Amino acid sequence: MPKFHCELNPIESVWCFIKNYVRKYTDQTFDCMIELIKEAIEEFNDSDLNGKLWRRFWQAINMYDQGLTYAEIITLLYGSRTVEIRQHRQIYNTTL
């Protein structure tokens, strides 16, 4: 795997899941964030996402063994998706 290869690194996907979960349900307080992190970990463990991430990782490893490039692998694994980019920084003056 290329160094800093975040698209196919399973731990990066776990962090992404947890951050998205916290952002979705936060009320911008520290105590709420701590509870939401615990909930997100439980939610992740209960989902099939963990298995999917590992399957994708091993698919990529096999594709590298077959001689495909990083760009070809990303296109094969993610090419049919369209991704909407959203701003993730939401700090409000009322909570400072």
Image (tube, helix red, strand yellow):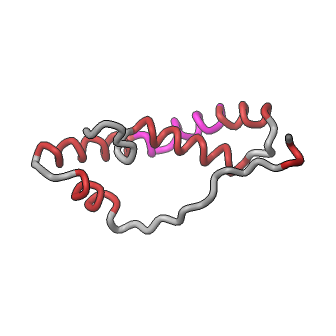
**In the displayed structure, does residue 19 sit left or right of residue 76?**
right
Q: Is residue 45 magenta?
A: yes
Q: Left or right? Give the position of 53 relative to 32.
A: left
Quadrant position of residue 86: bottom right
Q: Quick one: which residue is furthest to the left in this view?
A: 66
Vertical relation: 80 (above or below) 25:
below
Q: Quadrant of the N terminus?
A: top left
Q: Main secondary structure of the magenta part?
A: helix
Look at 58% across and 34% down and name the residue there.
41
Residue 18 locus on image (x, y percent): 58, 40
Across and down, in percent, residue 64 comes to: 17, 45
Image quarter of residue 27: top right
Residue in view at x 72 percent, y 48 percent: 25
**On screen, residue 72 above or below 34:** below
Q: Quadrant of the C terminus?
A: top right
- The quadrant in which residue 74 appears is bottom left
- The reply to whether the magenta stretch includes residue 52 is no
What span is in magenta? 38-50
Residue found at the far right of this picture: 94
Relative image position of residue 81 (x, y in whole percent): 40, 66
